[in-house]
Image (spheres, grey):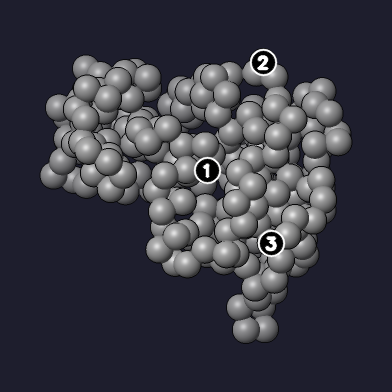
Amino acid sequence: MNALSDKHILEIFNVSKIYGSVVALNNISLAVPQGQWLAIMGPSGSGKTTLMNIIGCLDTPSEGKVLLDDLNLGNLSHSGLTAIRRESIGLIFQEFHLISYLTALENVMVAQYYHSLVDEVEALEALARVGLRERAKHLPKQLSGGEQQRVCIARALINHPKLILADEPTGNLDEANENLVMDILRQLRDQGSTIIVVTHAQEVAARAERVIVLEHGRLVQDKLNDKVNSDSLEPSSEVA
């Protein structure tokens, strides 16, 4: 197992998200050490996706503070959040969001386009990491669901993100492909990546080192699946 860093890559302080009269998140505090694999669970409407969107710079909290790699996201403009999402976060969704008329290789290279110069060799290497180098010239319709999800993982990895966020990454997959995707995430964690997965599936959460459970926007459970220092579970201090 990859040893956890003493550094927290993500710290959330008293975060709430309110939509009119609906409290989607209610005073959430959380810290994630660099190199940890965290699963977020909870019933529909519990706030999982809202929390994921805030961590992924797709939304902002109504109250509280979020630090990503010691950077206060609340101090950033919309364009600044977009830059952080592009440069520091790899996003993997249940829906594959592949461009139908582009090959697997070209779909990976799209992510490069928004970050830096396009590099076909690097994109091929990313596909090789997920076992799809030989499928690089195939269109999405020529790939299985599991292969399409692995293209999405390659696309998320192409810019070497500090944090990988996966929202129900196995929700559309059969058991065999679910295991393939989970094995890839495990390998990434073993190589030092920090991974946060939103899931309804107990078998997916069981692969993580740590599981938190949300209910009605509140954090109601925080447990370790492995022997990790419990001092890593809360933000260390308020940071200006």
Q: Residues within 10 Å of mark 1 (few under 14, many from 20)?
A: many
Most extreme residue toward the bottom, as rendered?
20
Q: Identify the mark nearer the N-term, 1 or 3.
A: 3
Q: Is residue 239 left or right of residue 205?
A: right
The kind of secondary structure element at disc 1 is strand
Residue carrying label 2: 1
Residue 160 image position (x, y, % from top left): 42, 32
Tell me which amino acid carries mark 1. Leu
Which of the two discs, 2 and 3, sits closer to the camera? 3
Work out how far the residue at label 2 is from the one at label 3, CA to CA, in angstroms.
31 Å
Q: Is residue 147 shown above or below 30?
A: above
Residue visible at 48% across and 23% down in the picture: 184
Percent position (x, y) of residue 220? 82, 53
**Quadrant into which the C terminus falls:** bottom right
Residue at point 42% right, 44% down? 87
When the figure is inspected, residue 109 is found, relative to residue 43, above or below; the finding is above
* Mark 1 vs mark 3, CA separation in Å: 19 Å
**For this view, does 3 lie left or right of residue 150?**
right
User: Marks 1 and 2: CB-CB under 8 Å?
Assistant: no
Q: Secondary structure at mark 2?
A: loop
Image point 79% across, 32% down: which residue? 224
2 or 3: tag closer to the N-terminus: 2
CA gap, disc 1 to disc 2?
20 Å
Residue for badge 3: 65
Q: Position of residue 153 (x, y in %)?
A: 40, 33
Q: Secondary structure at mark 3?
A: strand
Tag of residue 165: 1
